[in-house]
Amino acid sequence: MIDLVDVSKRYGRDGTAWAVQHASLAVAEGELVALLGESGSGKTTLLKMVNRLIDPDAGCIRVAGRDVRTEDPVALRRTIGYVIQQAGLLPHHSVADNVAMVPRLLGWSRGEIDRRVDELLELVGLAPAAYRARFPDQLSGGQRQRVGVARALAARPRVLLLDEPFGALDPITRVGLQGELARIHRELRLTTILVTHDMVEALTLADRVVVMCAGEVRQIATPHALLTAPADDYVARLVDVVRAQSGQLQALAARAADAPADAADPPARAADAPADVTGAPAERGDVR
Ligand code: ADP
Ligand code: MG
């Protein structure tokens, strides 16, 4: 559905540093692929080349079999949903007007637009009666992101691009919205590229993960393959970081379980933890 073939991009005429170098990736219809990498690794640049917010210096990009260079960029962008970190809602427009933006540009009838707005607000978990007329500054960060997702889906795109959509949210809201994205993806089967620097987000949501470093694609693999067979030292280090963090949490839980019953923090929950926490300290030692 989305094919990137040997795509490169550098900024500035005298720029020697390539933002993206010889990147190739094929995203199948209905697949959710995560682009994972540190800040500055080229994730946003690669994503924006798919909907022609940026044009590559070399290589070819096809969406649904068509070379994006042959498409009018504005028309192309109306067929591709796009969600960014701060949702990018228009501040002086209501939630309903923000969601209706693309359908209105496409000339849908008033009735069609109203029905679609309600359907989408329901889909993203916002009761239309309560949220339609609100303005972006009357919403929480998580609610704004929900509206951003509704807006991206308004004109029934087949492709959805998300650039660190949950990056600015608190952890509980973030996990809630990650779950919503997984549900929406299961329901709609949109071909999806999710940019994130959060390894756990990438591993838990994606069918396949693309690890980027300094503009290069280092590995493309399922979450399982990434964890069990990292392609190089860089990917191995990334995997070790999450393993070490998870090991530290499990060790903490195990320690809490060993604490006396009258300790300040009662061990009831830790004792409920899976039996394998007892193996955590040794495992932690292995990955360091
Ligand atoms: P990421 O999204 O992974 O943080 P980006 O794709 O935004 O990375 O950036 C990749 C590289 O390109 C970085 O080194 C960044 O500084 C550079 N870059 C991004 N946008 C521009 C720009 N408009 N002009 C010059 N350099 C840029
Ligand atoms: Mg970015």
Image (spheres, helix red, strand yellow):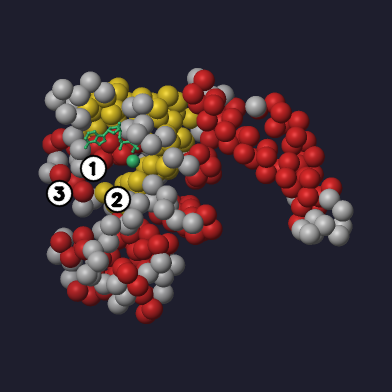
Name the kind of residue labelled 3 in the image: Val
Q: Which residue is mark 3?
A: 74
Asked if the residue at tag 1 contacts the one at tag 2, i.e. Cβ–Cβ closer than 8 Å, the answer is: yes
Crowd around label 1: few <14 · some 14–19 · many ≥20 (10 Å)? many
Name the kind of residue labelled 2 in the image: Tyr
Q: Residue at x 41, y 74 (%)?
A: 127
Q: Which mark, by number, is residue 51?
A: 1
- Secondary element under disc 2, as helix, strand or loop, is strand
- Ligand 2: quadrant of the figure: top left
Label 3 CB sits under 8 Å from any ligand 1 atom: no
* Quadrant of the snapshot with the C terminus: top right
Q: Which residue is mark 2?
A: 82
In the rendered structure, the answer to whether residue 159 lies left or right of residue 189 reads left
Q: CA distance from mark 3 to mark 2?
A: 13 Å
Q: Position of residue 205 (x, y in %)?
A: 49, 45
Name the kind of residue labelled 1 in the image: Asn
Q: Residue at x 29, y 72 (%)?
A: 135
- Secondary element under disc 1, as helix, strand or loop, is loop
The answer to which of marks 1 and 3 sits earlier in the sequence is 1
Q: Position of residue 104 (x, y in %)?
A: 17, 65
Q: Residue at x 36, y 26 (%)?
A: 214
